[in-house]
Image: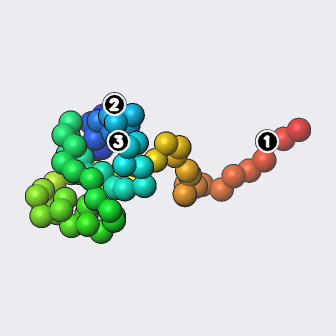
Amino acid sequence: MGVLDKEVATYNANLSSLLEQQGKFVLIKGDEIVGTFDTYGDALKQGYAQFGLDVFLVKRIMLAEHALFISRPIVPCPP
C-alpha cells in the first residue's frame, strides 16, 4: 500500500460532492476531509499546522486529471 493511498481513496470516494468547489484545494488526512481552501498555500499551511510532518494530502479539486510530469522518456513503439 502506498503512502497516500488512503487519502487518494478518500478524495475519489468524495469527488462528486467535492466538485461543488471545483478549482479549490482540499486537505485530506486518512479518511477525513479536513477542509477546502482557495489556494494551495493555505491548504498546505493548515496541513502542517495540524499534522506537522505526518502524511496528508493537498489536492486541487478537478473533474479531470491532467498529467504534469513524465517520469521517463517516451519512446515511440516500433511499427
Q: Which of the 4 image quadrants contains residue 48? A: bottom left
| Residue 9 seen in the figure | no
- Residue drawn at x 34%, y 31% is 13
Judged by depth in the image, the label closer to the viewer, 1 or 3, is: 3
Given residues 25 and 29, the one toward you in this image is 25
Task: Indicate the position of residue 51 as horizontal and vertical percent values.
Answer: 12, 56
As measured in the structure, the alpha-carbon distance from the residue carrying label 1 to the one carrying label 3 is 39 Å
Q: Which residue is denoted by mark 2 in the rendering? A: 13
Q: Secondary structure at mark 2?
A: helix
Point out the tag, 2 or 1, that comes first from the N-terminus: 2
Q: Which residue is denoted by mark 1 in the rendering? A: 77
- Residue drawn at x 40%, y 42% is 19
As measured in the structure, the alpha-carbon distance from the residue carrying label 2 to the one carrying label 3 is 10 Å
The tag on residue 18 is 3
Q: Amino acid at mark 3?
A: Leu
Query: Is the residue 56 above or below the residue 2 in the image?
Result: below
Q: Quadrant of the N terminus?
A: top left
Q: Are marks 2 and 3 in contact (CB under 8 Å)?
A: no
Point out the tag, 2 or 3, that comes first from the N-terminus: 2
